[in-house]
Image: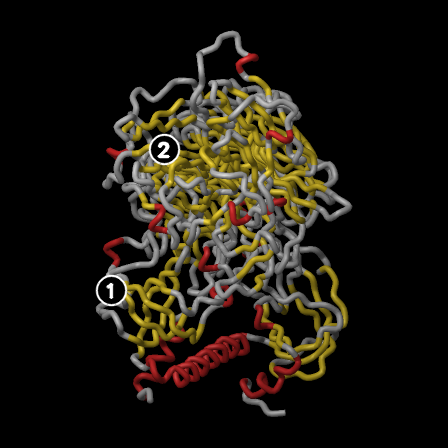
Amino acid sequence: MATARDRSALRDWAGQSGFIFRGTVRRENAATMASVPAEAGTAVVLVDEVVKAPQALSGIAGREITLLPADGSSMKAGQSAVFFTRSWLYGESLAVVEVGRLDLAAQVDEVRALVDEAESGRADERFLDRLSRAELVVAGTVRETRPRQPARPGPVSEHDPEWWEAVLDVDSVEKGQPPAGPLTVLFSPSTDEFWIDSPKLVPGLQGVFVLQRDQEERGFPALRVLGLTALHPLDVQPRQALERVRTMLGRRS
Amino acid sequence: MALLLVNMIPNSLSGETGRDSECNVAVDPVRPLNIAASAFTLDPMLSGNAPIFVSLDGGRTWTLNVVLPGGNKTGDTTLRFGGTSSVLYGGILRSDNSNLNILRKANFNLPGLMTVLVDRANDDQPWVEAATVASGPGAGADRVYIGNNDFTEAGTTGHTATIDDSLNAATAAPPAGFGPVRLEPRATAATGGGSQDGPSVRTTIHADGTVYGAYFGWRTFASPANTSDVVVVRDDSWGSGANPFQALVDPGDSLSGLRVVRGVSIPALSTLLGTQRIGSQLSIAVDPSNSSTVYLAWADGTSAANYTIRVRRSTNRGVTWSADLQTVVSATNPALAVTSQGRVGFLYQQWVASGAGNRWQTHVEISDDGLFASPADTMLANVPDANGFYTGVNPIGDYSCLLAVGTTFYGVFSANNTPDLANFPNGVIYQRNADFVAHQLKDLSNSFVATSIDPFYFRLTESAFQVVGLTEDGGMWHTIRRPDGSWQSSFGDVKAQESNDPGEFEAVGSAGVNGELHVVGLTEHGGMWHTLRHEDGSWQPSFGDVKAQESNDPGEFKAVSCAGVSGELHVVGLTEEGGMWHTIRHPNGSWQPAFGDVKAQESNDPGEFSSVGCGGVDHELQVVGLTDDGGMWHTIRHANGSWQPFFGDVKAQESNDPGEFSAVGCAGVGAQLEVVGVTEHGGMWHTIRHANGSWQPFFGDVKAQESNDPGEFTAVACADAD
């Protein structure tokens, strides 16, 4: 079993790691990629089992990759561990930088559960941050969408959010006080790289809307407008998330 | 010119489905095997930083190195190396706060983020160019120019077209001398809350210190089209004086910046050509051999339907300009480059409406005369205007990129990544797992992956003719005939380049594959050995034992022929017993795991083979073998790996019989296989297998075409010289 100290470290490592796996060190001072500098001090590690990996690396289990040990640590051929790593090189193989290591190869299920728990905790923290910054959180339905009028004055850019507004029918207010009259929310329908992951509101969409005022987090300042906005991917949640939202806001239905 | 075209997504990211668009490329001029590139590519591990593409082998293979700050992927990104410093410079729009960052990194292949030299808000489309002063004042200093559209001026002067430049950027502490130079002296288009120029600002640098800039001087802003001047500025001393970029004065208003055209219509930035937005496409390139000659491309029109790229030239330092040298309708993302020989490259992406589905065709035209009188047009890609996993608009991005280093062109563009050779009519290499028969991408576990948008790299190199000869003592020697007709001054001893000596060579075959010369030699004991000459002139350090790569040994080889097919080296060897065996060297250096018995693929056996020739034709390997009785037989290995089910009797296709053949050579020329056979009496005869499978109806007597007769021929080789 992992100790409490392990658990704490693990959560920290999990937060820094994009790729977590159980692996076996095959060769010391070696690499699977020609572009890894000879003096890098890397090791070749077989990925025995994936604990966490991005979709783009599907199928990486069973392959040898290159691992740069964390500062001050060493590796020995034959050593098995759960490796917490972050990205370095993606090529004909993979090279990663070690963040942490748990010599718990036989207890991967426990590690996986702890990683899942840490991931869930981090997701909660990110969403709670959005909730905390929100001026208004409501559950409701998009009644209609339309280009913002009047159009934003000022510079013209291909990175323009192309501001539209959505009129919401509000079922419940979870945080803040809606303005008098129809609740309108600014969003970006643009598929420009700056805005491609911003929520695209459409009539009939039901959800929980986490609304910031006068956002300053993305886009050129010269292209911003004043108002309530839903721009971050977390700012529009499915209706089923309402109980979670209420819990996080300290409210109960 | 020889083409190398590579899908840049590396094998380890075979499961990738992003919109990797709007790519850019940088080539280290002193180490042109070192190449960096960018696209809207995500760090899949979400490290909080973004990758660049890195190649250390001239673009044949690519690796992502996570070095860009400011989010898991970046917005607009361009890269350039210093002229001799090998320092990589970048201009990016961060995705975390949308700020412009000007970046620097001494070694682009090492881990660690690029150093932020400038961090500024409200700035669009940074485009980096860089050079190193070769001699005179400032010798050794990196001069870096970053065109950008700075909205901080929109609310005041409206002069947003800007170049941030540094006269010594390589090592100084941030901001390393970078500062904005406003290019626009005229009133710009009022947009309701200010005024501004168009997004694209480009520069091009000559080694003598001449720096040109180009921008869209927007004059009126409206929908569906704006009006704009296309303006060129120039500085004759690196932009180092008190009034930089004011050397060109327009005679119409006596203001700096020559208006190449005035008041042309440019579609609004939200206009779509197919699924790609348009409205600010611009490129400028100076002739490295003459700073007075400069080329300009831009696109204008009142709508997507008549959006037209125009190419023009000035031969007097931008003072006057030609009429349109080239126009392409319904096209975007022009990119120009000029080689050291004055050849002009023009890259563009053209949208083609089709009842069978709209397409994006990516072309590169090469004009030897600079006038585009009869440019050589190579279609790099002809892909669906369908974006796969990503279903939105803007699939290919707002720009592509073309560079010239020496006599070689380097370029990048984005396109749909469906693995279908019909989409890449001049061949392509995928690093990611791809099934070109089923036209499906596969992840590392061989599961289906949705199509998406990928970056593609290409390189066009001068086609040098290379010769490998064997001497009576078994030596192997090499020489080159250069494009200008001159020859390498002395034969190079290939064995002297290698650390091992397989013994005396008795037969040899060679083929050019992706800009490299591959050589396969047979030793007196029937061994088969391989080496290759890289495009930089270096050789593989030791001969590789081909037999050691294979799980079977067909016996002693006595004859060999090679051909490049779709980026792979195909080798056909004949054994002492007259067998015919085949193997492949893949682009990643691995070999087919076992020699394939060609005869076992065929339903007939013409007898023992004694001579063989082969050529690549339209993604297929075609093989011609001569039998001991002088017959000539032909077969094909199709792109899917299957073989024509029987050897075809070539003589049976012809109305005449020149006699027994004793030697053969062949080559793929366009869509045809051309075959030359030497008869036992020294005659030389020629035939053609056409693209439709038919043959020229008779052997042609080559000697009868010539005015002299060198005597009896005993051996033959041939090649496509294009």
In depth, the one of B698 and B220 nearer the eye is: B698
Name the element at disc 1. loop
Marks 2 and 1 sit apart, C-alpha to C-alpha, by: 42 Å
Q: Mark 1 — on which chain does it sit?
A: A
> Neighbour class for label 2 at 10 Å: few (<14), some, many (≥20)?
many
Question: At which x and y percent is residue B467?
Answer: 38, 27
Q: Amino acid at mark 1?
A: Glu
Its colouring scheme is secondary structure
Residue lying at 63% horizontally and 69% vertically, measured from the top left: A228
* Mark 1, residue position: A28
Mark 2 lies on residue: B507
Q: Is residue B414 visible?
A: yes
Q: Is residue B153 left or right of residue B351?
A: left
The percent coordinates of residue B279 (x first, y second) are 65, 42
Which one is in front, B188 or A253?
A: A253
Left or right, A169 with respect to A104, comes to right
Q: Residues within 10 Å of mark 1 (few under 14, many from 20)?
A: some
The amino acid beneath tag 2 is Ala
The answer to whether residue B262 is above or below residue B127 is: above
Which x, y percent locates residue A217?
Answer: 52, 64
Q: Nearer the viewer, residue B263 or A246?
A: A246
